[in-house]
Image (cartoon, rainbow, N blue to C red):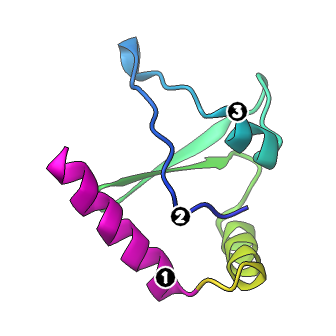
Amino acid sequence: MISTVPKNVKLWGRGQLTIPKECRKALKLDNETQLNVFVVGRCLVLTPKSLMRSSLSKNVEKSMKDQKLSLNDLLKDLKNERQRSVKK
């Protein structure tokens, strides 16, 4: 699953957030799942702790190919979403 449409989440007290149900289901995340958190530019990236960067890269690449998305498609959508959220 690759979604170029962002899911809005609220940051709660002490920096907590709720990952949307459809995302948790697609990634098979449960209450016991630990996550790695990365900051990439102004983006926050969460990955299951068991998922290593090389396998993450392969999974993203495969999902992009399956959905016929290019890196330029993702970057264009990201730029559009940033512009949209700045207007809010």
Q: In the figure, 14 relative to 50: above or below? A: above
- Across and down, in percent, residue 63 comes to 74, 74
Please tell me whether residue 33 belongs to the stretch shown in magenta.
no
Query: What kind of residue is marked 1?
Result: Asp
Q: CA distance from mark 1 to mark 2?
A: 9 Å
Q: Earlier in the sequence, mark 2 or mark 3?
A: 2
Task: Specify the quadrant that holds the C terminus.
Answer: top left
**Dominant secondary-structure state across the stretch colored magenta:** helix
* Disc nearer the start of the sequence (3/1): 3
Residue nearer the viewer, 63 or 45? 63
Q: Gap in Å between the C-alphas at discs 3 and 1?
A: 25 Å
Instruction: Name the kind of residue labelled 3 in the image.
Output: Lys
Kindly check if marks 2 and 3 are in contact, taking CB atoms under 8 A apart as contact: no
| Three-letter code for the amino acid on which mark 2 is drawn | Thr
Query: What residue is rendered at 72% in x and 40% in y?
Result: 22
Tell me if label 1 and label 2 are in contact, CB under 8 Å: yes
Observer-nearest of 29 and 78: 78
